Image: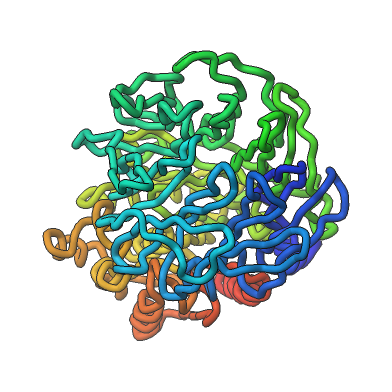
Amino acid sequence: MHDLERYLNVRSAYGASIGPEGTVAFLMNTTGTPQLWTLDEPGAWPEQRTFYDERVTFCTWSPERRELAFGMDEGGDEFTQLFRLDAGTGEVHPLTATPDAIHYWGGWSHDGDRIAFAANRRDESVFDVYVQGRDEQGDDARLVYEGDAWLSAVGWSPDDTRLLLSESRSSFDQDLSVLDIETGDRTHLTPGEDAARYASPSWGPDGEAVYCCTDRESDTLELVRIDCDTLETATVESGGQWNLDGIALDDETGRFAYSRNVDGYTELTVGELTGPTAYETVPAPALPDGVAGGVSFEPDADAFAVSASGRTTNTNVYVTEFGDSDAEQWTRASTAGIPPETFRAPELVHYESFDGREIPAYFTLPADAPEGETPVVVDIHGGPESQRRPSFSGLTQYLLSRGYAVFEPNVRGSTGYGRAYTHLDDVEKRMDSVRDVRAGAEWLTAHPAVDPGRLVAWGGSYGGFMVLSALTEYPDLWAAGVDVVGIANFVTFLENTGSWRREHREAEYGSLEEDRAFLESISPINSADSIAAPLFVLHGANDPRVPVGEAEQIAEEVAEQGVPVEKLIFEDEGHGLSKLANKIEAYTAVVEFLDTHV
């Protein structure tokens, strides 16, 4: 049996970009935090390009030069700054120098001379749009649009005169617009009043239209074309039962790849536009059975890179020629000497909740699970506008190796199952999702391998709220709880979260002005005296999303009830853990806690 540190040392390579000379850049966490690496050929020894203690968040090649843009924050605070790396000399040039502002990358111009980004420099609650020369540094960017909402720039038009913008009011309500860079005129492409998602918008050939995935006219996300002049929307591919997650489209050739989310598993379709809404498909690459994304075409679109991961396959970068079903694995992220054949795959199950609704979940048993004696970690995802999918997790595999089963429900409110499903937990229906967790626990107690007295509620962010709510609402079900960066009090959470996020979050949870009494009533802190199970609380001091005060208040309140509580706060982390040393310390403590109490 391998120890926890070995499992946490299983590496991931992802976020690839192909440069003008065929060099693949990507992020990999070999050093303990994600850094920028490059490869000139598949399977070769990669070259490390950045050497920071902090995580690099993205990387992307210039379309014309051997240089890369990348982003990095400090201590998990999410105040991302932008940098340019000269791949020839290795020199790094800071593109931004406003450490108290967030910078969202908006792309290279096609000639590689300029970049675009959105930032909340002027007012932390809104984002403006900026354009900057590639060789300008610090705060030399030109403000081209003064925003009044959460804006991001998502791509330059083929002639580099316009920017495609996305405005987000909530996770389920976005709008697209086109900004003329010189005049500052902004034209809305989606002027309707009804809330809808517009995911992964991309310019089409000639800049005449935008392609994106939307649920404006359907329950699931479908691929549509929006004409920039007439604003007419035409369906290219319907979602059917399952969401089309996103599209990567080359705006010169019309070649594309889009993904379909089939019960959490990715199905990739590759093709080329033959008309405004017509296309022909070519063979898609054979990838590990799991989750794939982050498609990046090389400059002439003859090949593309994609990151892929499965429950028994750690994340790596694959490159495939357009139209070739063979995907060549370029990176060899280490499995830390653990034989991949020992990794366990989940079973996709469905269980009935309180109202008869079927809830999907992944259930993984350890090898040789003893009948009636297996403890179970019920791992609840965050969001709630998210979905547990079958990607690799070293921590999950370690728990399985230690004899724990892992149960991962996609309770109501999760994405991936249509728009109606995502809204089943809105505001006053919030606790229905907690009832789904109870139903999952009851399903587990009836499973012949499971010990009903050894169920653990574990979750992060919104999943942390779900853990605390499960412990307060159904205290007799749980042997222990693990709350990672979770919400204990919706009122203090909304009061203290980043101002740029507050309106966005109130659209999901309810507003302080109109729903305060309800938010108080469902906040676990106000029912903490019901918690009977030992609790582990884990948080980052720099968390801008769920401030660390949430951890401090729930740990203090539960400890006052005489319940065993352990609290661990990391001063150099934010909303989750990104540094390997911190993960080892944190999860070693969590596992020891579970071994003691479960």
Residue under the image location 39 percent in, 51 percent down? 152
In the depicted structure, whether residue 88 falls above or below residue 313: below
Residue 554 in the figure: left or right of residue 262: left
Q: Nearer the viewer, residue 61 or 382?
A: 61
Residue 73 in the figure: left or right of residue 162: right
In the depicted structure, whether residue 76 falls above or below residue 190: below
Quadrant for the N terminus, please.
bottom right
Quadrant for the C terminus, please.
bottom right
Residue 125 x %, y %: 29, 65
Q: Residue furthest front?
A: 182
Quadrant of the rendered image containing residue 561: bottom left
In the depicted structure, whether residue 46 falls above or below residue 468: above
Residue 308 x %, y %: 67, 41
Residue 407 in the figure: left or right of residue 438: right
Residue 287 x %, y %: 71, 33
Residue under the image location 71 percent in, 43 percent down? 20
In the depicted structure, whether residue 501 falls above or below residue 350: below
Q: Residue furthest left?
A: 514
Q: Is residue 272 visible to us here?
A: yes
Residue under the image location 70 percent in, 26 percent down? 322
Residue 16 x %, y %: 67, 47
Image mark count:
0
Quadrant of the rendered image containing residue 12: bottom right
Residue 124 in the figure: left or right of residue 298: left
Q: Nearer the viewer, residue 364 or 179?
A: 179
Q: Which colour assignment does the render follow?
A: rainbow
Q: Nearer the viewer, residue 536 or 282?
A: 282
Q: Is residue 476 visible to us here?
A: no
Residue under the image location 54 percent in, 61 percent down? 454
Q: Nearer the viewer, residue 577 or 269?
A: 269
Q: Residue furthest right?
A: 44
